[in-house]
Image: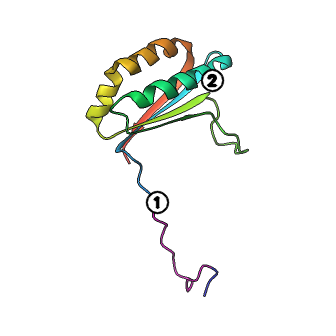
């Protein structure tokens, strides 16, 4: 038998928990002033999870593990998860989201946004 207790055949992949929602909204933001990173992160953390349509949320900064092909040309990465496209569209129009965008978008140097469904 092999080291994993198998007889050398192909092992099945481990079962991982599913993402908590059907739609993933990923935003990578490069701020014009790096001094604004903690404040934008705090504002996002305080505001976005309060929006009722949000089923999952995480915000963080780039991690450098020494891989040349991994992008680190952003200051904050934000993932917001929704159960449906309708919930996502309602989130975009929600006053809390609109307030956050109104305050922070003028401070962005650039952004990269992708939406996908697992």
Q: Which mark is residue 38?
A: 2
Stretch of the chain drawn in magenta: 4-15
Indicate whether residue 42 is drawn in magenta: no
Check disc 1 and report its element: helix, strand or loop.
Answer: loop
Indicate whether residue 5 is drawn in magenta: yes
Q: Which residue is painted at 39% across and 20% down in the image?
A: 96
Percent x, y for residue 22? 34, 45
Above or below, 18 relative to 28? below
Check disc 2 and report its element: helix, strand or loop.
Answer: helix
Circle 1 is placed at which residue position?
16
Please tell me which residue lies in front, 14 or 113. Answer: 14
Dot 1 alpha-carbon crowd within 10 angstroms: few under 14, some 14 to 19, many 20 or more: few
Q: Main secondary structure of the magenta part?
A: loop
Q: Which residue is painted at 52% across and 24% down in the image?
A: 111
Display coloring: rainbow
Please tell me which residue lies in front, 82 or 109. Answer: 82
Q: Which residue is painted at 65% across and 15% down in the image?
A: 33
Q: Which residue is painted at 32% across and 20% down in the image?
A: 93
Percent x, y for residue 26? 47, 35
Instruction: Work out whether mark 2 precedes mark 1 in sequence or the reverse, and give the earlier one.
Output: 1
Q: Nearer the viewer, mark 2 or mark 1?
A: 2
Percent x, y for residue 102? 45, 12
């Amino acid at each position: 038998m092999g080291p994993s207790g198998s007889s050398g055949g192909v092992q099945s992949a481990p079962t991982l928990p599913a993402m908590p929602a059907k739609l993933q909204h990923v935003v990578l933001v490069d701020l014009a002033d790096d001094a604004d990173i903690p404040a934008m992160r705090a504002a996002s953390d305080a505001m976005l999870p309060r929006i009722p349509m949000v089923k999952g949320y995480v915000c963080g900064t780039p991690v450098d593990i020494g891989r040349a092909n991994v992008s680190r040309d952003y200051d904050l990465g934000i993932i917001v998860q929704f159960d449906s496209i309708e919930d996502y569209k309602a989130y975009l129009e929600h006053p809390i989201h609109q307030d956050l965008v109104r305050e922070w978008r003028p401070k962005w140097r650039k952004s990269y946004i992708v939406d996908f469904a697992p």
